[in-house]
Amino acid sequence: PVTSRVTLKVNGRQQTIAVDTRTTLLDLLREQLHLTGTKKGCDQGQCGACTVIVDGRRINSCLSLAVMHEGSEVTTIEGLGTPEKLHPMQAAFVKHDGYQCGYCTPGQICSAVAVLDEIRQGIPSHVTADLTQRPLLTETEIRERMSGNICRCGAYSNIVDAIVEISG
Ligand code: FES
């Protein structure tokens, strides 16, 4: 194995870490930094359980090598809120029961937070052709933008309710 070093700011803390160049960002977070809030589901980019926010954009951390993110700012679920002071999106998920088993929840919440940033930046979705005709975020648009985050329990309608509350 080839070892390299990568410097990242993770949840506000800058650190330089020695990594095998084949290590994914997901494995770096979970196995080297012990940030196990980020989940490994499929490890193939299909479920969204591993979603984290890198430089303001959500990514599937299982598909990305850690060494590709030199100098980046990474936010995981642990960096969004604390048990004492939840992020508003976390509080909305609790209020609306936006989960059942909870395994997909960290990825859902990271994704949802980044979705609202996409809206603020005016990044169009595939289903909303007319940006003048809108509430800020329609339910259909939320479902489309969140379609990369799978919930095997099927808590989708409650997840959407939580995001609607925060986006309104
Ligand atoms: Fe990364 Fe499923 S674990 S998309």
Image (cartoon, rainbow, N blue to C red):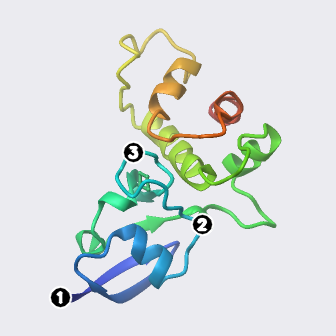
Mark 3 CB within 8 Å of ligand 1 = yes
Dot 2, crowdedness within 10 Å: few (<14), some or many (≥20)? some
Q: Nearer the viewer, mark 3 or mark 2?
A: 3
> In the rendering, at what x and y percent does residue 61 appear?
38, 60
In 3D space, how far apart are the residues under numbered discs 3 and 2 (Cα atoms)?
A: 18 Å
Q: Earlier in the sequence, mark 1 or mark 2?
A: 1
Residue 46 tag number: 3
Of helix, strand and loop, which one carries label 1?
Answer: loop
How crowded is the residue under tag 1: few (<14 C-alpha within 10 Å), some, or many (20+)? few
* SS category of the residue bearing label 2: loop
Image quadrant holding the C terminus, namely top right
Q: Are marks 3 and 2 in contact (CB under 8 Å)?
A: no
Residue shown at 49%/39% (left/top)? 115
Q: Amino acid at mark 3?
A: Gln
Cα separation between marks 1 and 3: 28 Å
Name which residue type carries label 1: Val
Q: In the rendered structure, which amino acid carries the disc numbered 2? A: Gly
Q: Residue at x 67, y 46 (%)?
A: 89
Identify residue for label 1: 2
